[in-house]
Image (cartoon, grey):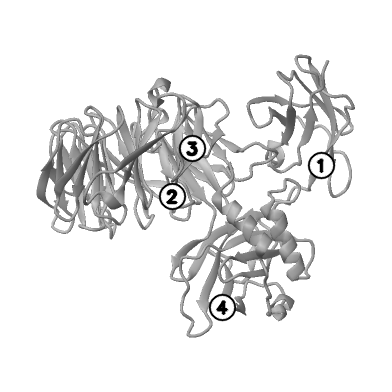
Amino acid sequence: MTSKLFFALLLLLAALVVQVSAQNSNKAAPSPSPQAVNEQGVSIEFRVTPIDRKDTSRSGLIAGQEAAVSFKITGTNGSVPITNLRPAVWIDQRPGKDPSDLKECRDKIQTFLQSSLARRPTLDLNSYYVLALNQEANISVIDPLSGFGGSKLFNLLALPGAGEDWVLNSDQNRLYVSIPAMNQVSVIDTATWKTLANIDAGVKPSRVAMQHDARFVWVGNNDDANGGVTAIDTATLKVSSQIKTGAGHHEIAFSFDDRYAFVTNKQDGTLTIIDTRKLTRVKDLKVGPQPVTIALSSLSKALYVASEEDGTITVVDTARLEILTRIKTSPGLRLLRLEPDGRYGFALNPDLNSVFVFDLTSNKLIHKIDVGPGSDQITFTKQFAYVRSNGSEFVTMIKLADLGKEAALSRFPAGQKAPKEAAVSSLAESIVPAPEEGAVLVANPADKMIYYYAEGMAAPMGSFQNYRRIPKALLVLDNGLRETKRGLYSTTIRLDTPGYYDAVFLLDSPRAIHCFNFAVDPNPALPKAVAGLKVQQLSADSPVVGQPYTLRFKLIDGDTGEPKSNLNDLGVLVYLAPGIWQHRVAAKPVGEGVYEMSFVPPQPGVYYVHFRIPSMDVPFSQILPLVLETKKS
């Protein structure tokens, strides 16, 4: 599957005719100072700034430390910010100090748009990762746009136990995962894909929620005897407080100013309000029997709490902390979601195979819509509400623009089987919006697949293998620039290798190409970077289907040309393109940098062989793979 953005950029490159006049800015010495280029009535100002610099004696960027990258795009006449743009940006390390000229810049873009395995940028700020929370104790990290060697599996993250829920911070560099069986929350650094901490977070930590300001992560503890929530300080990764609220499952929401946390207590039928500054209970409200879901409206500034037993939706004034009214539906409510920045709320009732739609301005029901059997999840794009059915492979789409008059429905198949056939569940969502506008990703645990659907199509445009693992939930980690202010497009990066870099910039309309340059200084606190490694294939024969095949190869230091010997943790991943079969094994050292491993190819085709060395912090994606093609016996 190839993203719409990829095709759009490829077409743009073919037709692009750009004259960039500010060549003098390319002659400046690389530095973190702002750089600007003016062309066709537009000013583009580039800035890269260290984040949380502890050593104030050094002003430049330092390897291994985070930095903010931003592009301020304004009109040259009056400096009016230009909004709603989609600039494409790559960060690429240069071999020397000399900045890239316009031709070199164009050549880089052409190469990057082709997703060449042999020539990839250091960082691709136009890509995204799809994270799958699996039934097993791990998370699949999938690169849907390029992958490596034909495989979309970028990484596989081990967890202490099976995950239940998760949340990303706003910078998308920290992932928090609840592990109920271990009474822990795992914290993962998404820049390095390493676990930073496994935090003891009370009994049966389940629902995970983060304040808007990211000060605390809150975890619901589903302990009937001492039910409540645990507040984790995101700066120290330590528990700040554990607060008893009531018995049963807990859902969590926050006021828009983060002054209050709202926590439901299912067995007690109450809503607990917590002062997040003092970390103390303020009051409890009796909201209805078995409150199971909660949502906060940016339009009405009210909190909505749905009760499963009697089907009421209790509306709470978040300023006065009092109940305003109740909306009556039918018993069996399980999920409540509000249209982002819109006027409609959606309450799912899987017992009736229905969704109740209510108006947030009047708190009145306007529709009862029949959807698929066992509908249990809902997500939104600008145009549609998507309702997943646990008892059917079909996803129902509800057109948002028509809800004032009628409920216009359509649907598409997200797989071959009903999700419930996998007999797994998670609090986290298995249907999420894709970064591309008007598209969603759907995990089907019964198929062990992830499907990509774009609006206007009768069926998904493509799918991703989860490599025999059962996906319970999905998250999208978007590496791209985000418009953080009007005309300001920003993201956070971390470069672990010192040297000279280009920020390769491509803008569609108005069209512009430019390579901004900057440098990254060595970090004496970091270990010496691992030298580039190369694999030389020694076996001259080809594998035969159904017969054992021994692959012999030499591992070579790319800088010195010397063999790398006696590695006892050299792991090998062999898979049949496009990922329909895979085999993992440890390579056996045989001396002088030579290693061997064996496998039996199950069917004809092209096999990719990838290598990793945990002791040297070398992942599968770092070493160029070998490619083997089977021959007839």
**Residue 292, image quadrant:** top left
Which residue in the structure is indicated by mark 3?
Answer: 460
**Is residue 106 among the parts visible in the rendering?**
yes
Badge number at residue 534 = 1
Badge number at residue 43 = 4
For the residue carrying disc 3, how many other residues have a C-alpha within 10 Å: few (<14), some (14-19), or many (20+)?
Answer: many
- Image coordinates of residue 510 in percent, x first then y, are 57, 71
Could you tell which of marks 4 and 1 lies nearer the N-terminus?
4
Q: Is 344 placed above or below 88 here?
A: above
Assess whether mark 4 and mark 2 are in contact (beta carbons under 8 angstroms): no
Badge number at residue 438 = 2
Could you tell which of marks 2 and 1 lies nearer the N-terminus?
2
In three-dimensional space, the C-alpha distance between marks 2 and 1, rounded to whole angstroms, equals 42 Å
Closer to the camera in the image, 441 or 210: 441
In three-dimensional space, the C-alpha distance between marks 4 and 3, rounded to whole angstroms, equals 40 Å
Disc 4 or disc 3, which is closer to the eye?
3
> Residue at the spot x=74%, y=20% of the render?
601
